[in-house]
Image (cartoon, grey):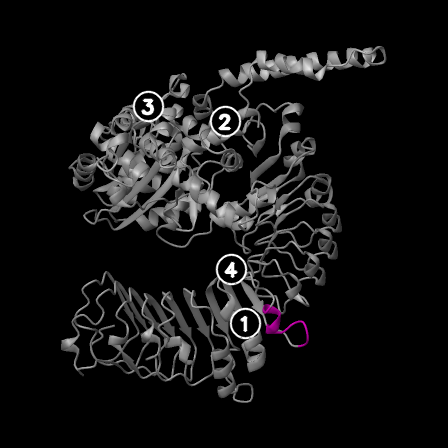
Amino acid sequence: MRAESQASSSTVRKLLPTCCAGLNPSAIELNMRTGSRLRGITTRLEAIAKEKNELDVGIMAEQRSKGVKKSATTSLVKESDVCGRDNDKKAILELLMNDDASNLEYSVIPIIGMGGIGKTTLTQLVYNDERVKFDCKAWVCVSDDFDIPRITKTILQHLESCEDNDLNVLQERLKEKLSGKKFLIVLDDVWSNNHDDWTALSLPFSAGARGSKVIITTRSEDIASKMGTVRAYTLERLSFDECLRIFTQHALDSRNFDAHLELKEIGEEMVEKCKGLPLIAKTLGGLLRHKQNLEGWEDILSSEMWNLPETESGILSALRLSYNHLPSHLKQCFAYCAIFPKDYEFEEGELVSLWMAEGFLKQKMKKKHMEDLGHEYFRDLSSRSFFQRSSSKISRFIMHDLISDLAQFVSGEICFYLDDTKKEPCSVESYAAVRHSSFTSHRYDISQRFDVFYEMKNLRTFLALPTYLSQSRPYHLSSKVLDDLVPKLKCLRALSLAGYSVEELPNSTGTLKRLRYLNLSYTWIKRLPESLGELFNLQTLRLRGCRKLVELPTCVVNLINLQCLDIRDTDGLQEMPLQISKLINLRMLPKFIVGEGKGLGITELMKLSHLQGQLKIEGLHKVNIRDAELANLKEKAGLCDLSLHWISNFDDSLRNERNELHVFDSLKPHRSLEKLSVTSYGGTEFPSWIGDSCFSKIVHLKLSTCRKITSLSSVGKLPALRHLSIEGMDGVKEVYAEDFQSLVTLYIRNMLGWEQWLWSDGVNESTVGKFPKLSELTLMNCPRLIGDLPSCLPSLKKLHVEKCYGKGFAT
């Protein structure tokens, strides 16, 4: 990549004589023409080298992207990972709990400090402190784009379900929700100092009760003075000892150097370089945990990167240093992340699929599967603090805004994010250099918006980034983009149109021979063209949430390199394509619909030996015992989440209790299973393997509408079971409490026949320790349940009881 080039003009010239060798008369004319071209190339390379040396990540930090962001509500934090902020936390808590006697309806508390100093982390600590009592709370990651409707909607979504986008409607509803209530609202990472915007946003806040608070975090004193009603709290750098603790934790998994005395002296010098900034300590520590020897640490300490000009006290040098010491394969993978706008939340599996499509996952000897290698790369980058887990959803990740700036810088012109607020167009030459692009979806995307992509002849990635995914409120895309633009992008390897109201793909899609990744999730697609079968390089086909999809074309089984066929939430899909067993490389097939006839039955699963993760099997009432055995689930060690679904109709003419028991028994999975869901099973008892102690990894179990089951005793024998959901089990009258010693959450709903808890000693008063770990208990619509709740629930934090009318329940 251009950004990785360290060549100076002298290096460029050194290469030229070799290129221009050959002085025979017949070659003179050619050499003259070549020499002229090379002089032009040399001039261009010298300019690039000069520009590279002059560029600074600090410039990128100032030229922040203005595109629409995917909102991130990162309000949670692992407190044990935070160091040195006790006094700061105490000070902010005092400000929050001080209901001053001023005439203001609410107070605005600004927290200011440089990037990477820990403003967001401190605010997370305060926000989640048990002493912080407010009627309602909301957290919004504001970032660059002070989009008043988006911010208002995000606040409102913390209080109620909301799909409106009209600002007036949003503000009226927010005002109504806040009226008379004491609220806490956090606006994290504010960059706009437009006072009019702040005035407009804050209009509904005045409806709240006195003592309400708004916390803003920002790097700008000007913003703090304009928005704050109290004196801004300035977050200072950490002490040396505090910084050392963070550094050693990430570098050595230790609180100090006691177990690594040979690294103590140089390590302390490194901590001095952190200058009290926790992000530097964390990033450097992540870098050095991969260099567990003195020589490696000395190499980092002596790097010239520390001497580069800075805008924010060494933090950018530390980040660049960390990037420069990445292995080349990780540099490429990280730079690719420049296609994501700031605050965009991404899934690990999704990014790995894109890396795989781009050909970034390579190894000299094929000892590992590409996808496994990609997850290894991802974990490596995470351990070096390039990615951090989002607190809004545990499966998602996010990049710190300075890390995002670094990705933009090192990717150069290779990555392009379509920024609709840019005033000055890039040059045609710049567009020609682009390989990977993304854009935030708009409600109505006209073809003119995408005109710049016609110049990107070598484009490999065309990625839609919707701010949310919903078929009920789709994005609309001009048909010209699909019919005219996309077929011209012959080098495409990754194409996503997720979230658009696309009903069909043109046959020309089959001409994209290099395509390896196709994402049509949450579109209105009904059928896929037969030309799809010509995409022999396709590895990933995502159709999640395509509720209008009625069938998959038979040509799908020709996609011999397909590894992921994501058909989750495709309610209209009635059966699998004929002979799906031909897709022997499939690793992700989250749903299988049992059909009738050869090539459609459950035996098709037999040859799919590489399946990983989740598998939901629908239509098990069509399966006989022999076919269930041939499916060979017990050998599929990669499956960790299994859902078994029978038909919901319990008409005796359609069901055979004994057959269903034997089929269920024959579907015994591998003992590595972690999550099991059973729906509409018609047997009177569970198979013996349900209570087998060899299933020591099952932690989640959901049993739904198994109406003929009368006992749950076998379920209680699962030794690691932590989360249990039971609903619609009308035949169950008694639940033995001592069967569930490891439970953390218990959800029981619509148990119309359930009458009582049973204890081995026969009395409730002796139930001490029966549910020692239970933290959440939900009981809903259990009208016959009598008796009290268990008398001793030492770990209980959340209790919800509804429509339980028996003795002991006042609901």
Mark 2 vs mark 3: give the one in front. 2
Give the CA distance from mark 1 to mark 3.
66 Å
**What amino acid type is highlighted by mark number 2?**
Phe
Q: Would residue 283 appear left or right of 430 to someone viewing this image?
A: left
Secondary element at image label 3: helix
- Where is mark 2, residue-wise? 409
Give the CA distance from mark 4 to mark 3.
52 Å
Residue found at the far left of this picture: 765
**What amino acid type is highlighted by mark number 3?**
Asp
Mark 4 vs mark 2: give the one in front. 4
Give the CA distance from mark 2 to mark 1.
50 Å
Identify which residue is drawn at 51% across, 45% down.
Answer: 351
Give the position of the C terminus as an image quadrant.
bottom left
- Quarter-wise, where is residue 143 in the image? top left
- Quarter-wise, where is residue 188 in the image? top left
Identify which residue is drawn at 48% across, 69% down.
Answer: 643
Q: Which residues are magenta?
A: 597-606
Which callout, 2 or 1, points at the residue further toward the start of the chain?
2
Where residue 437 sits in the image (x, y, percent)? 59, 36
In the rendered image, the vertical position of residue 428 relative to residue 99, given as above or below: above
Identify which residue is drawn at 37% across, 42% down.
Answer: 140
Mark 1 vs mark 3: give the one in front. 1
- Where is mark 3, residue-wise? 222
- Where is mark 4, residue-wise? 612
Give the CA distance from mark 1 to mark 4.
14 Å
Which callout, 1 or 3, points at the residue further toward the start of the chain?
3
Where residue 463 sits in the image (x, y, percent)? 59, 42
Q: Which mark is residue 31?
A: none
Q: Would residue 112 appear left or right of 414 to someone viewing this image?
A: left
- Where is mark 1, residue-wise? 632
